Structure formats: structure tokens, C-alpha cells
Image (spheres, grey):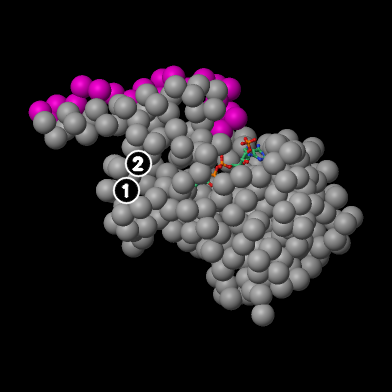
Amino acid sequence: MPRLDGKIALVTGAGAGIGEAIARRFRAEGASLVVNDLDAERAERVAREVGGWSFAADVADSGAVARMFGTVAKRHGRLDVLVNNAGIAGHESDPSRAERFASATLAQMQERATSGAVKTHIDVTLETTDAEWERMIAVHLSGTFFCTREALRIMSPQLAGSIINMGSIMGTAGGAGVPGYSAAKAGILGLTRALARELATRQIRVNAIAPGWIETAMTAPLAPLRPLLEMQTPLGRMGSPDDIAHAAVYLASDEAAFVTGQVLSPNGGWHMSQ
Ligand code: NAP
């Protein structure tokens, strides 16, 4: 029997990358999909392909999020799985930043290996504007909170549900050059644990996935770092969106009925847990 047979699932940021892979994998396991994305066309394309429906909304906009979940309540009357996946890398407003970060990282490696004295520095924190910082926290952390709060209006009376939040190894290990992203992802992991405790009495499980380096549009600008990332990853490759989608299927399914407050980190061994 399919592992998500008959479940209604909403995936945010599912118009591309990891979210799209999760939507497709959920569908293959029998779920009915609500596909959210900022980009209406992309959301609609994925929804059409998986046989679900789409709702374009910015997860950082609490009004839009409330309208989206109001529509879910009207159309389905229930919600079994929420995946808070929507995210941004932080270099959207300045595409040269990712390139400069990649070349500075490689230069640092070279300097360490040859003279030991590092002369190249990464100044992303100095360059980050108030607006960039606030957008990063808004999309990841507020977006996860807004979607969860609205989902609970449906899930709480059901006394059942699974919420999956997208963290990152940057939220556990930290990352040079991504201060806002690391802070937002670490916040998501804290929020996951708090929600897991609060919602356990209703049998609503809340878990996080903390992916390693995954091949998507988000990591494409870091192409010059790819050999380095592969070398730093014991399993020797970057992950695919499906590597994460399989983890999401498990956490969404009844196989994970005794799993809550956990961080599952498919990362090829880049970061190992205790
Ligand atoms: P992606 O390919 O860029 O896809 C992200 C999707 O989310 C895009 O379709 C994007 O739409 C959408 N989105 C962005 N902001 C949104 C918003 N405010 N409201 C609704 N949708 C929004 O990125 P990805 O690599 O699949 O990342 C998915 C999640 O995994 C993110 O939370 C990311 O932080 C996390 N993650 C990724 C990696 C990795 O290596 N790729 C590693 C760890 C964690 P637009 O393109 O229109 O903005």
C-alpha cells in the first residue's frame, strides 16, 4: 500500500527544487497535494503534473498564508501533512555575492595550504543590509511560523498531523558567508522542538530535515565550489532533491508515528550527529 495513501499534504516552495521533489514523491505515495510557491506559474505547473491544486502565496505574508489555509479548509476540511520548505539563499538581490563567496573560499583554502596565512576574508555580514536580513528571517522563520499557525487551525481539532520543517546543516554547523541563513535555519530547529512539545498532546508530530549540499537552483551559483563540497562530503557527492524527498515521505508517514522533535539530516556525512 502507498505510504501516504489518502493524506492531504501542503508543501510550500514546491514550484522547484526540493519542494517539487517532495510533492512528486508524496503523490507517488498516494497523497493529494496542495502546491504552494511564490511563483504562480511554477506552482500551477507542478500541481497540474501531480494532479493537485496550487496556491501562489508569499509565506512571509501572514494574510496570504491565512487565505491559503482557509482555501485548504474549504476544499478538503482537513490537512494531514504540512511541509514548510520555501526558502531563499540570500544572494538573490546581489548575484555577484555567491561568486565572490565561492572565489574567496577557494582563495582561503589555497592560502592555508601554501603559506598558512589567510589574507582573503569573507565580508558578507558587513555587506548585509537591514532589508536582506529581515527578508531572510521573514521567509524562513516567520514563514514557517505563519504556515504552522494556520495549519493548526485545521490540524488541532483532528488530533493528528505531521509538520516537517526544512532546516539545513547551516543551522546546525553554521556557515561562513551565510549569517542570516544560518540564524534562520537554527531558529527553525528551535521552533521545531518547541512545537513538537506543545503539539504532542494532540498527536501532531513536528520534525525537521536538515539537508546537506543539494543540487538545486539555490546551490547552482556555487558551482566553482562543487569539487570542494564533494571532497568534504564523505559519500563523495552532492545530494539530489529526491534524497530529501525520501526523508520527507518517512516523516510524513505513519511509519514515523513515534518520531517527533527530531532533526533528520541527509547530508552524505558532511555533518555527523552525536
Ligand atoms: P530552490 O530550488 O530555490 O526552491 C525554493 C522554492 O521556494 C522556489 O520555487 C522559490 O520560488 C520558493 N520560494 C522562495 N521564497 C518563497 C516565499 N516567500 N513563499 C513561497 N515560496 C517561496 O531551493 P531548494 O534548494 O529547493 O530549497 C528548498 C528548501 O531547502 C529551502 O528552505 C532551503 O533553504 C532548504 N535547503 C536547501 C539546501 C540546498 O543545498 N539546496 C540545503 C539545505 C536546505 P522563487 O524561485 O520564485 O523565489
Residue at 41% from the left image edge and 20% from the top image edge: 126
Query: Is any atom of residue 264 visible in this view?
Result: yes
What's the residue type where badge 2 is placed? Arg
Q: Which residues are magenta?
A: 115-136
Q: Look at the image and tell me whether residue 146 can be seen.
A: no
Identify the residue at horizontal 64%, vertical 58% (top origin). Answer: 24
> Could you classify mark 1 by the number of other residues whose Cα lies within 10 Å: few (under 14), some (14-19), or many (20 or more)?
some
> Residue at (71%, 66%) from the top-left corner?
31
- Name the residue carrying label 1: 230
Left or right placement of residue 84 versus residue 209 in this view:
right
In the rendering, at what x and y percent does residue 63 appear?
79, 37
Q: What residue occupies the far bottom of the structure in this picture?
A: 1
For the N terminus, which image quadrant? bottom right
* In this rendering, position of residue 228 left or right of residue 137: left
Direction left: furthest residue: 115
How many residues crowd around disc 2 within 10 Å: few (fewer than 14), some, or many (20 or more)?
A: some
Image quarter for ligand 1 equals top right
The x and y percentages for residue 239 are: 43, 53
Q: Nearer the viewer, residue 253 or 60?
A: 253
Q: Is-magenta flag for residue 120?
A: yes
117, 107: nearer the viewer: 107
Residue assigned mark 2 = 226
Q: Position of residue 2 (x, y in %)?
A: 66, 75
Q: Which of the 4 quarters of the picture holds residue 151?
A: bottom right
- The front one of 46 and 183 is 46
Disc 1 and disc 2 in contact, CB within 8 angstroms: yes
Query: How far apart are the two marked residues, 1 and 2, measured between alpha carbons?
Result: 6 Å
- Residue 105 magenta: no
- Where is residue 134? Give x, y as percent: 58, 28
